[in-house]
Amino acid sequence: MGAGRLYTAVAAGGFRRYATYRAATAAGVFTNTVFGLILVYTYLALWDVRPHLGGYDRAQAVTYVWLGQAFLSTLAIGGGGVEAELMERIRTGDIAIDLYRPADLQLWWLAADLGRAVFQLLGRGVLPFVFGALFFPVALPTDVRTWVAFLIAVLLGMLVSFGIRFLVALSAFWLLDGKGALQMMMITGTFCSGMLLPLNVFPGVLGEVVRVLPWSSLLQAPADVLLGRAGALGTYVFQGAWAVTLLLAGRLLQSVATRRVVVQGG
């Protein structure tokens, strides 16, 4: 089997694996919808006091909320991707089996995570977003090209998200317990991605800093493309630069970690 077919099969397997958890998916749709409602009414109250906060009008702010709910599991902003399983395999030593496979460790897990992400987008992300669009005023483009540009930004966001989480997962080679790293990743991701508030709202230096961090590629960047607040090309360059940087850093750390396993007799 060629490398392309191999990783396509791994991605398809990741998709099918998450598709089997129908009850969990239904519960996730319900949870995302409820949290979306809470955030929408919170945002509406805030935008009543501060119209055009962050450069968004009310409809754009509402759209941003439902995009966040669609991306929460898709991009594993607060965790919930393949990183926990990978860390567990490192902890138990099962990672040695992965290293014996005739496949690259990083690409294998990237393919699996992309399959998971696509399912979460279709199975758990679309319905809350459609619900929000039906019952609240939203700002959605009518131009097909904008939607295509938006989906490309989402795909790049998937790569950046995996790059961050793969680095965190590899920390398990040096840590006795990866729970602390996962918790820090969840807190940082939730805050710096714009899940709580759009990053455009953050004031002064704080706002400037969070907007150039990789987490802004996950929600803020695709949202601004869809809402017409940012150009597609500049967004792609920003996301692509972070994706390449993180994946290269992951490959370097993987090489160091692999040597560590060999030295330890793994």
Image (spheres, rainbow, N blue to C red):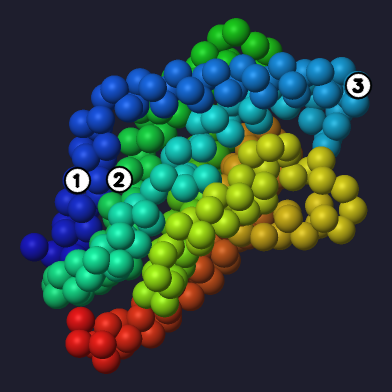
Give the mark nearer the N terminus: 1 vs 3.
1
Residue drawn 65% across the image and 19% down it:
38
Res 229 quadrant in image: top right
Look at label 1 and name its amino acid.
Gly
* Whole-number angstrom distance, CA of label 1 to CA of label 2: 7 Å
The tag on residue 13 is 1
Give the left or right position of residue 213, taking residue 264 as reference.
Answer: right
Res 253 quadrant in image: bottom left
The tag on residue 49 is 3
Residue 11 higher or lower than 126, as above or below:
below
Give the mark nearer the N terminus: 2 vs 3.
3
Q: Position of residue 73 (x, y in %)?
A: 45, 38
Give the left or right position of residue 213, taking residue 186 as reference.
Answer: right
Residue at label 2?
115
* Whole-number angstrom distance, CA of label 1 to CA of label 3: 48 Å
Element type at marker 3?
Answer: helix
Give the left or right position of residue 92, taking residue 68 as reference.
Answer: left
Look at label 2 and name its amino acid.
Gly
Where does the N terminus fall, quadrant-wise? bottom left
